[in-house]
Image (cartoon, coloured by chain):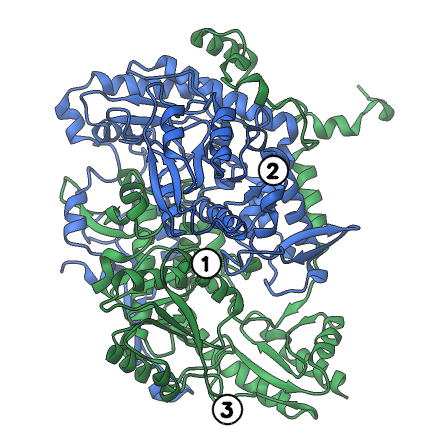
Amino acid sequence: MTIPPDSIDVDQVHRDDTSDGSPFAPHDDSEVEEMLAAVGVDTAEELFDIPESVRFEGSFDIDGASEQRVRQRLRETVEQNEDYTEFLGRGHNSHYVPSIVDRISLRSEFLTSYTQYQPEITQGFLQVLFEYQSVIAELTGLDVANCSMYDAATALGEAATLADRSRRADGNRVLVPDYMRDTHRDVLENYVEGTELVVEAFDTENGQVNPETLENELSEDVVLIYVENPTIEGVIEENLTEIGELSDAYGALYCIGSDPVALSLLQSPGSVGADMVVGDASVLGLSTAYGMGLGMFACDEEFLRQVPGRLVGASEDSDGTRAFTLTLQTREQHIRRERATSNICTNQAWVALRTAIHAASLGPSGLVSLAEKCHRLPERVAAELDEIDGVSAPVRDCHHFREFKARVEPDARELAADLREEGIAIHALGSDEIQVSITDVNEHRTDDFVQAITEVMN
Amino acid sequence: MQRHDQTVWNDTDVDGYEPLLSEKGLKEVEIDSALPDDLTRDSLELPELSEPELARHYTRLSQMNYGIDSGPYPLGSCTMKYNPKFTEDVAALPAVSVHPDRDAESIQGTLQVFAELQEYLADIGGMDTVTLQPPAGAAGEFTGIMVAKAYHEYNDEGEQRDEVVVPASAHGTNFASAAMAGYDVVELPPGSDGRVDLDALSAAVGDSTAALMLTNPNTLGLFERDIERIADIVHEAGGLLYYDGANLNALLGRARPGDMGFDVMHFNLHKTFATPHGGGGPGAGPIGVTEDLEAFLPTPQVRERDGQYDLVEPEHTIGKVHGAMGNWLVLLKAHAYISRLGDSGLRDTSEKAVLNANYLASQIDLEIPFGPFHHEFVASAGERDAADVAKRMLDYGVHPPTTKWPEIVQEALMTEPTEAESKTSLDQLAAAFNAVTEEGEQTLAEAPENTSARRIDQTSAARNPQLSWHSLDS
């Protein structure tokens, strides 16, 4: 049979599966009838025990659409984003994510499960999280890693409140470096809102901590000293051990902000006296994803009972076989309620799974060579930029990781705007500095980048 | 859970069902860097395996994990419903991943999705404005309470209002979130019908009340029918009314928190809007507020003007609650889900979720107090240990309910089937409940027997914490 073309209502074809009700509720009419009869009502409406005065009779004016239409519409929407090669970093970095990460993490047994309240049927996820904790423990050189916070900023907030709970002496000062990212400091300020803690910034020199300057700020009432390695400017901190000695001398806890790729190469925080490590672990496993993250959190065993969030531990089942379970849950909000060590329930477990797979797929050799690349590439690009008239790079006279600042004239913002015309995004910091992040993700366009700056500056 | 009838390939003789990566092969790499020695570590020791070995390792582990695609997951108050597959493809579009410091002009697509989702959620919640920044439900609670606090401070009542009232049956996160914001928590005892007791409420609120945090329907699955009176009592005392959105799935398109008198609310996108819970996250916990509270929202806020999207700072913003803009990929999935369903799909969701809860409750031979139920109910295991009941249910191939909570029901089994279960699967669930009810204490105490691990010793895990492969007893 041939159907005359004008008799086909294309819209109807697209809408047929959404014109009535949810496509994800599997009931047919006869089942609904049977169920209503079993409950003893005539219509489902009768089950809604809602006073007339607050019933909603209106519409949201949201037209349901077919899967195909929704995908098409959202694709067209997000494709309005300009397609730039990003040389942006400043605390949000990404590396190439191998396909195995997507393919495995999208297995629905992982993706569609929830917190492992029944360990006997969630051994798979628990083991991955145990392995994630183990990788973070190795990288940080600390005993205990939890299996995720939301992001670097909220992890730092939790570190500060841990310090507040664990402080050995009276005190309420949290010291952070002046280079710290504003957004992260802002989150920290909110996290300490319910405590007596006060956040203060200390001066740094040439982009890193000068222990003498820091010591001038120290007194017995400091509960936490926070520094980053690498810093938000990509500076590799040279005085980590001295800072650790100072924090010990004044009875403060010492927290280092970093990430798993940097930690594959740089000094292990445990070896320089750090009590805690926070940072964004999603540099493995996720793209920049508009800042969606994975809060890394590790600490010395001394603070085990104060750790926020979920911990997976090894145990045995009744056959004596090794098995994994969430443990030390008496710290958690569903048991200790207002005395919990944090309010976190849903965290970023699936991102932790992706990070664990990414780390495993690189292995120690791959992690170290990726990290070494993050040191060598920016140094090379900085040297090339330094050859250009009007550019001096890097601004800091020190070692760099992923990122560096460069001084430019006449105007950094104009330069950034000109580069956007070439499809390249960089940070303009004030009127005369730019910051550039080079990793394996934009490595293939570094020659274009140097060339573009050369042309703009001429 | 029945063992799958398939060959299990075990490639080592190490104890345990699937060896740890570290047991399959650790490698220590000496660091030889262009950097000075004193700035680098000496070595790094981690597993080093080939991609085929890793693919098998993780596939095996996935087979040792139960998700909503594996079977029913009626975990009360967690709203574990089916997640459509297409949303993952939307979240994987190349144009989706942008750096959070990109200028607004260059990411109009991302900002449009934000603005549309803000609008959808504001409409669904009956609120005036929504922020998408909080990365989870509890983060939404904390944000909402911080906004309430900023509001009171702005009105010079910050010091005076130092208490948050929370019903005993509320989610534990409510207590913790209020405490994190620096509040004293006043626990509200339940009324005899499982709902808020108005006299107890009147006694609990006053000049020092900053807010009442309420879940509606509450965690017993009961709608707070006196909600307007509750709102009046709280407002007359000068407090704000906070809506915990954990149970919003029961109300979609039928009642809106804003219309009930709530001033601030959070949404659990990973619950109501079917974005996968991912083994415990990521979720997203946007909050909605009335006009009076808009000025205090986190920064930045996405705003549309003449078809252009921009990022603006609310006048008296509390600042930030996440380093960037929250869990963008989760937000995108929620947008896709809502625009797929539309009005009729959203309304049908609550209808089927509520029908399923009431039908399942009618088929279970256990005491189920109170009712009628919205999308969840709490059965009582009576003299039996609810945790043992749950362990035995695992043997019937289903995920059990939330156990031993809320504490106002003896040995609680808090059950939420969601709209995604068919009558057939509800009947199987009921059969599992009823079969377990018939079984002897000994069977329950020894359960489970058909799972990838037998009953796990929680006590020794806590007494002798082994939290990484470095600390495993050797």
Front residue of this view, candidates B94 and B179: B179
Q: Colour of chain B?
A: blue
Q: Which residue is mark 3?
A: A397
- The answer to whether A449 is drawn above or below residue B300 in the figure is below
Mark 1 to mark 2 CA distance (whole Å): 24 Å
Q: Which residue is mark 2?
A: B127
Q: Which residue is mark 1?
A: A190
Q: Residue at x 64, y 35 (%)?
A: B123
Q: Residue at x 60, y 58 (%)?
A: B97
Where, quadrant-wise, is the C terminus of chain A in this rendering? bottom right
Front residue of this view, candidates B291 and A457: B291
- The answer to whether B431 is drawn above or below residue A430 in the figure is above
Q: Position of residue A205 (x, y in %)?
A: 47, 87
Q: Position of residue B91 (x, y in %)?
A: 58, 49
Pointer 2 indicates a residue of which chain?
A: B
* Mark 1–mark 2 CB contact (< 8 Å): no
Pointer 3 indicates a residue of which chain?
A: A
Q: Colour of chain A?
A: green
Neighbour tally class for label 3: few under 14, some 14-19, many 20 plus, Cα within 10 Å = few
Q: Disc 2 marks which amino acid?
A: Met
Q: Position of residue B355 (x, y in %)?
A: 48, 18
Mark 3 or 1: in front is 1
Front residue of this view, candidates B255 and B431: B255
